[in-house]
Image (tube, helix red, strand yellow):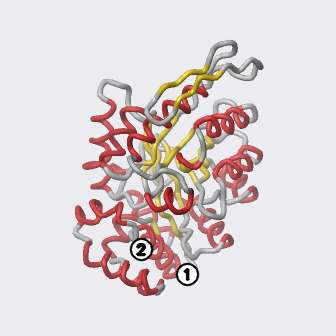
C-alpha cells in the first residue's frame, strides 16, 4: 500500500484528495514513505495506515512523528497495526503473544511521549513498557496527534474504541463487517467517549481500457489477504469457506491464477471497487452506508501489481471523488 509517488501525489492533491497514508512491508518503511509524503504535499492529512506497532519502541514511533510534525503541523495521524502472529515472531523477531493487550499498552506509551511537556518527567508504567525519562533538552511539548488502530476482528475493534482515537478498517471489509461487527465493537469499547474516527481502505482497480485485468488484480488482492487465518470469522460470517479453502490450496502451490479464480463474483462485488469507472462508481454508491466515515483510501491492489500499474490505478480512482456528492467522507489515494 505505498503512496503513488510525488508526481501522482501532487496531481491527486490538486484534484481534491485530502489524505494520504503510508503502510509497510518487507520492501518499504512507513516512516520513510511518510517523510516523502510530507515533502510533496501541502494540505492533506498524512500518516501511517498502518505502521507495525511492535517493530519499534513507543519512543521511536513518537520521535518520528515529532520530527515530521515540524514540517506538517496539524496534518499528522498515526495508524498502528499489531501485524500477524507469524510476522511478529518470524519476521520482526519480537514477542507475538497477547497482541491486543500489548498494543493497548503501546498506544499509552506512545501518547506518553507525544504528550510530554518540556521540563516535566516522561513517565509511563504499563504491563509491557516502563518509561522514566528526564529529557533536559527543550525539544518536547504536547502534540495531539490522533492514534488509530488497525482492527479487523471484534476484540481489536473494542480495544480501538477503548484506548485509541479511532480505527483503521481493512480492505476486505464489507457492508456487513463494518455495520454489524466492527462499529458495534468500537462503540462498546468507547463507552461514553466521543465518536471514534474511522479510516479504512477500499480495494480499487479501475481500467476502462482493460477492465478484465483490473478485476483480476482485485481478485488476486482479495485472495492474498484471505490466505491469513486471522480472517476466518469474516469468512464464516459470509459463508465463503469453500472458495477460501480453494484459494488457500492454490496459494500453497504457488498458483496465483487459481487463487484469483477461487474468488467469487459475490466476493468481488462485496469487497472491491473494480472494472470500469462506471462499475466502480456503481459499487461505491451501493456501499454508501458502510464506508469509513472520516477517511476512505482508494487503495490499488499491490499483490503482483507493479508500481506503474498501481500509479495508473491511483490516477483512475480520482474519477470517484465526486461519486457521492454531499457526503462528508474524505477520499484518499494510497
Q: Which mark is residue 210?
A: 1
* 7 to 49, vertically: above or below: below
* 330 to 252, vertically: above or below: above
**Residue nearer the viewer, 179 or 54:** 54
Quadrant in the picture for the C terminus = bottom right
Where residue 328 sits in the image (x, y, percent)? 46, 40
Q: Is residue 123 left or right of residue 242?
A: right
* 323 to 264, vertically: above or below: above
The number of discs equals 2
Task: From the image, tell me which residue sits under label 2.
Answer: 223
10 Å crowding of disc 1: few (<14), some (14-19), many (20+)? few
Q: Is residue 20 left or right of residue 328?
A: right
As helix, strand or loop, the secondary structure at mark 2 comes to helix
Q: Which mark is residue 288?
A: none
Within the image, what quadrant is residue 59 found in?
Answer: top right
Where residue 53 sits in the image (x, y, percent)? 53, 46
Where residue 121 sits in the image (x, y, percent)? 62, 16
Q: Nearer the viewer, mark 2 or mark 1?
A: 2
Is residue 325 something that shows in the picture? no
Within the image, what quadrant is residue 138 found in?
Answer: top right
As helix, strand or loop, the secondary structure at mark 1 comes to loop
Amino acid at each position: 500500500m505505498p503512496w503513488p509517488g510525488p508526481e501522482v501525489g501532487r496531481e491527486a492533491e490538486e484534484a481534491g484528495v485530502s489524505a494520504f497514508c503510508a503502510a509497510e512491508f518487507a520492501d518499504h518503511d512507513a516512516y520513510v514513505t511518510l517523510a516523502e509524503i510530507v515533502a510533496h504535499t501541502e494540505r492533506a492529512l498524512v500518516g501511517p495506515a498502518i505502521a507495525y506497532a511492535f517493530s519499534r519502541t513507543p519512543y521511536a514511533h513518537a520521535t518520528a512523528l515529532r520530527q515530521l510534525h515540524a514540517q506538517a503541523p496539524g496534518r499528522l495521524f498515526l495508524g498502528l497495526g499489531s501485524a500477524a502472529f507469524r510476522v511478529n515472531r518470524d519476521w520482526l523477531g519480537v514477542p507475538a503473544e497477547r497482541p491486543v493487550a500489548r498494543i493497548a499498552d503501546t498506544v499509552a506509551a506512545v501518547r506518553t511521549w507525544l504528550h510530554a511537556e518540556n521540563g516535566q518527567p516522561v513517565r509511563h508504567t504499563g504491563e509491557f513498557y516502563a518509561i522514566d525519562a528526564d529529557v533536559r533538552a527543550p525539544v518536547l511539548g504536547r502534540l495531539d496527534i490522533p492514534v488509530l488502530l488497525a482492527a479487523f476482528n471484534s476484540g481489536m475493534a473494542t480495544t480501538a474504541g477503548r484506548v485509541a482515537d479511532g480505527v483503521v478498517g481493512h480492505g476486505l471489509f464489507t457492508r456487513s463487517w463494518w455495520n454489524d461487527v466492527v462499529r458495534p465493537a468500537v462503540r462498546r469499547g468507547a463507552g461514553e467517549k466521543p465518536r471514534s474516527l474511522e479510516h479504512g481502505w477500499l480495494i480499487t482497480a479501475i481500467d476502462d481500457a482493460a477492465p478484465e485485468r483490473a478485476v483480476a488484480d482485485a481478485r488476486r488482492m482479495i485472495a492474498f489477504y484471505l490466505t491469513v487465518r486471522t480472517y476466518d470469522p469474516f469468512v464464516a460470517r459470509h459463508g465463503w469457506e469453500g472458495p477460501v479453502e480453494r484459494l488457500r490450496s492454490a496459494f500453497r502451490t504457488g498458483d496465483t491464477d487459481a487463487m484469483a479464480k477461487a474468488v467469487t463474483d459475490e466476493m468481488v462485488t462485496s469487497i472491491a471497487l473494480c472494472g470500469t469507472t462506471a462499475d466502480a462508481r456503481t459499487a461505491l454508491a451501493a456501499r454508501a452506508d458502510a464506508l469509513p466515515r472520516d477517511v476512505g483510501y482508494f487503495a490499488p491492489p499491490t499483490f503482483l501489481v507493479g508500481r506503474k500499474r498501481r500509479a495508473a490505478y491511483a490516477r483512475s480512482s480520482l474519477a470517484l471523488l465526486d461519486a457521492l456528492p454531499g457526503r462528508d467522507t474524505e477520499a484518499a489515494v494510497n
